[in-house]
Structures are given as C-alpha cells and as structure tokens.
Image (cartoon, rainbow, N blue to C red):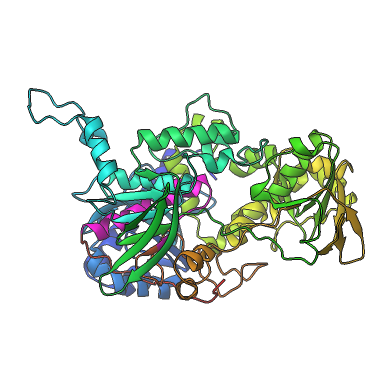
Amino acid sequence: MTQTLEPAAATGARERVDTWLADFEAALAARDAERAAGLFATTSFWRDLVAFTWNIKTVENRDGIADLLRSTMESTDARNFHATEEPTEADGVVDAWIAFETAVGRGRGHLRLTDEGAWTFLTTLYELKEHEEPQGERRPMGAEHGVNRERVTWSEARQAEVEEMGRTRQPYVVVVGGGQGGIALGARLKQLGVPHVVVDRYPRPGDQWRGRYKSLCLHDPVWYDHLPYIDFPKNWPVFAPKDKIADWLEMYTKVMEVNYWSSTTCKSASYDEEAKEWTVVVDRDGEEITLHPKQLVLATGMSGKPNVPQLPGQDVFRGEQHHSSKHPGPDAYKDKKVVVVGSNNSAFDICGALWEVGADVTMVQRSSTHIVRSDSLMELGLGDLYSERAVAAGMTTQKADMTFASIPYRIMHTFQQPVYAAIKERDQEFYDRLEASGFRHDWGDDDSGLFMKYLRRGSGYYIDVGAADLVADGEVTLVQGQVVELTEHTVKLDDGTELEADLVVYATGYGSMNGWAADLISPEVADKVGKVWGLGSDTTKDPGPWEGEQRNMWKPTQQEGLWFHGGNLHQSRHYSLYLALQLKARLEGLPTPVYGLQEVHHTG
C-alpha cells in the first residue's frame, strides 16, 4: 500500500530508517545480540535469504532474532546498512529498501518500521565479493583483438566445454531435471562459473511442455514468468501457449550456454560421506556415464511423481486410462465418454478441451476446490506487482520479487485475505452459479485463497480461464464422491453410482518431491530429508509443526550435498539466485556455517 507523502512526512520516515539502521549496525559491531534484538517490535519477523544464515530462514520475535544473531553476527560481520531509495510511510508503517555488506558478499533487503521498532526485516545475499557475475562493466569482451596463432574461438571453447564435462572434467553440480527450474539454475551457475550439468530425459529443452495436452497455456501472466537475465519480449502474450514457452526454453538454454544433456536419464545416485561427493550414473542417449559431482540438485518441479490411484478393476477396464501428465489432448476422444477424476487446474483444463471437441465429459470431484477467475486474479491479486500497470508505475521484476519475499509466511495470509474478499464480492454471481451446480467450493482454510493453498500444499485450486462455466452451466457433468472400482466399461463411485467411460483421466496430482530422492538415491535418504514443500501451517494437507519456510526448497537439507529446486516460473527465477550462491560459495571454499538447519517432522 502506498500514499502520496508530504515532504515533512517523507523526511521523518527517512530519519527513522537512518536512525534504526545506524543503531542496528552499531549493535552488530558491538556483537550485542540483545541490544540489536531490542530494536525489533515485540511481534516481529526477520526473513534471511542466505546473507546471515547460509540458509533460507525466518525467525520470529526478539528471542528468535537474538538467537540468530548470537550464532551468525561474528562470521557475517554485516555493515554499511543504508536506504537505497526514499522510504515511504502509510498507515503507521514505514517501508524502506536497504542495502548492506557482509564479510563475503553484498546484500539487499527491506525494512518495515512501526512505533515499536522493526516489524518485518528481509535480508538477502545477491553477490559474492571477488566472484561477481560478468555483467555490466564486467561483461566479457567476446572478441580477442590482435593476432594469435593459438587462438581459440568462442565456438571452439564452448564445444570443448561441452565435450569435456563428465569425461575429462567433472561437474561440481549435477542438476536432475531440465524444465524451467533446472534451466534457470543452470543459467545462474554458468554466470557464476560453476561447472555443472543439467540432465533431462527428453530429447529437447522444452519437451516437458511440448508433450502436454494441446490447449495448455501458462495460467500465470508474462510479468510473473520472466527467467533470469532475459525478459520475455514486450510483444510476448500475457499467457504463453505451451509450445511457445517450450521454444523459449530451448532458445534460452542455448544462448545462456547451459550445459544441458538431453535424452539423459538419471539411473542412480549415492553419496560417499568420506569423499564428500556423489556417484551419479546416467544413461545419455544409450551410453552409460558415471559422474562425480560434489553437489546434487533435484529440480523436478515443485511436485513429485504422478499420483495414480490403485483401484480394483483397472486391469479389466476396456477403455483407455492415464494420468493427466500423460494426457495427449482431446482430438482422439470426439463423441467419447470421458471421466476425469479430480477438480483442480489440470482437471478443468482437460475437461474444457474435451468439451470443445464434442466429448461427453464427467468430472468427479473428490474434495472441495478453490477457484479464482483469471482476470480477477490478474487485476486484484497480482496487478500491483506483475502487470503492465505495475511496469508503467516503475515496478521492476526484481523489486516485485523482493516485495513478495519481504512478507513473512506467518502473516502472509493476512495480506491475502482482503484480496480474496474483494474477488469474492466482484465475482459473486459466478460463485453463486458454481455452487448452485453442486460444486464444492472453498476459499482455503482461513479464507486466504489461492496463493496460500499453493504455498501450503501445492494443490486444491483452479485459475479459471473458462472451463468452470462449463461445470456451472451443466455442460460438463459434475458428480461427487470417491472412485472405488473400475469395471469393463464403467467407473464406480462409493455411493454406488456407475459412470460409463471410454477414457478415464486421473487428474489426481503429484506426490512430494522426495519421492524422486527415494527412487534415485534410497528410501533411507528420502526419509532423512523428509517431506518437501509446505510451511507446517497445520492446515489441510500441510501438517504442523510450523516451519516458517518451504520445507527443503533452495536450501541445505539433512543430507549433505543434496538440494531441491523448483516451483513456478517466479520461484524458479527468484530462488535460483540464492541456491546458486550457496553452491558457488562451497565451490570456492568459503565458510558457509548453516544456521537453523530444518528438522524433519514428516517423511512423505
């Protein structure tokens, strides 16, 4: 929230910020954790992305802040805190963008001040001293002027790097998964000079998108979806079709010089605790290659393996059946009877595409779903940060990402609740029609809507781009219940209903990412690491205790040398920086004492 400030108010806000930063820096210099913590409000939150903790960590209230500082302020040696633009004040809260230095790097962050002290504090590391990325004034020359009989062209050097990696040179990092997450991380690692290989089983970058059903488009808008270093062009569509985003990823992989191994399947991985390195066996287009990286990143998205229910009668069913991730599109199913099990994003998209070609479609809703119309989400939910309106007002992608990051997860629902109350009021007629059809709709456990559902459980929602009207109007048949059995020609529900079907689509979601760790490494390592994703909010499908950050994502895990990376395009872009910096620091032998390594409360 912003407001127009009178010059005196602006000056007062700046003085308060400058005074607070000076007092905080003085307390750090004196190594007085209690004094520094006393500058925070009684209820307060410090979110640190790598700068102090070599972790992604949020601590709460003065006791938590003092504990963080006692453990980190000596090694961090943070100093030179200052505001980077004029602070603003609204509703009794002063907002300030800040920058600072640590012993090994440079950081930026955000501060919210109340009369009681700091309410929220964000600190992030964005570069390592003496290991800055080669951009701006440090960009490479490219051309080598003069004459040189030993000249090696860019193309020759690039070819040598590709051919040597994994043969005469070992990658420091192996990234398993070459979707947008793995590609974004690969680009960061390349710019930081970290030897790496990104492996993916598909023949070309972007094939993860090309192989999905033909109507698939991104549900997030273009301003939210930029990759690191290269923004989408200004004429890029608001919602990119799947094949267009696939081509962009393929282009991006090439021009950013990501060491990308396509047609490569990771067969196994094991960690040698004494040597502190992995043995990773891959099949690269029929050739078995053994790699020995120090760090292994599983970048398989925010989801794990597809959840395919095991049901009696699946072996006798005479029609087709497949998970939504394998759905080829609607063309072969004109005039067919199709049962789609599920009622979230993929289920609605598939139902809509099947209806368009004339299929007889039934949706089986097993539990309530939150739906938000795309235009309302774009305008009310994302418009201030990710929109043409935001760009025109001077909002950059980096500033938008940092604004999101500055809101601690503990209180984020309170920022989201008014947004979804406004959406509910705006689209009340739509929700009335939807619920009149029998659809079970919810707004999340605490009326905080889509984004909190995504962060907490990664499921239970649909961004409506039109298919919800088909359910509301009865064009797609809606039934409630649990599938208990398949017969030769029907799907049976727990209330005895039988649905005729030529095709069954299981739009039943995905498991935790540590399912991949169980398959590639071992069930023991998967359990050692624990559940991936979720905040510990003790809401539906996100069991407590409270953890305060996404479990195991972009940060050290209980398994040394094992990392997880993924999420949507926004998260892949933003958090790939912090993961890459952690990996680069370890490559260079910098001290990386981890504060607050998360405990494991759930193993699946």
Is any part of residue 603 visible from this angle? Answer: yes
Report the number of discs.
0
Between residues 85 and 444, which one lies in front from this camera angle?
444
Place of residue 310 in the rendered image (x, y in percent of width and height, measured from the top left): 72, 66
Q: Quadrant of residue 156?
A: top left
Which residue is painted at 66% across and 51% down in the image?
418
Q: Residue 225, position in %: x, y?
A: 51, 40
Q: Is residue 514 left or right of residue 317?
A: left
Which region of the structure is painted magenta?
Answer: 563-588
Q: Is residue 432 left or right of residue 519?
A: right
Residue 584 located within the stretch drawn in magenta:
yes
Q: Is residue 170 left or right of residue 488?
A: left
In this view of the protein, which residue sits in the foreground, 458 or 304?
304
Q: Quadrant of residue 288?
A: bottom left
Question: Split into 4 quadrants, where in the image is the C terminus?
Answer: bottom right
Res. 385 in view:
no
Whole-percent x, y for residue 201 in the image: 48, 48
Residue at point 14%, 27% (across, down): 144
Q: Left or right: where does residue 189 sit relative to residue 117?
A: left
Task: Give the camera-side residue of 136 and 91.
Answer: 136
Chief secondary structure of the magenta portion: helix
Residue 545 colored in magenta in the image: no
Frontmost residue, 332 versus 250? 332
Q: Quadrant of the N terminus?
A: top right
Please state the horizontal and vertical placement of residue 349, each as a whole percent of the image. Answer: 72, 42
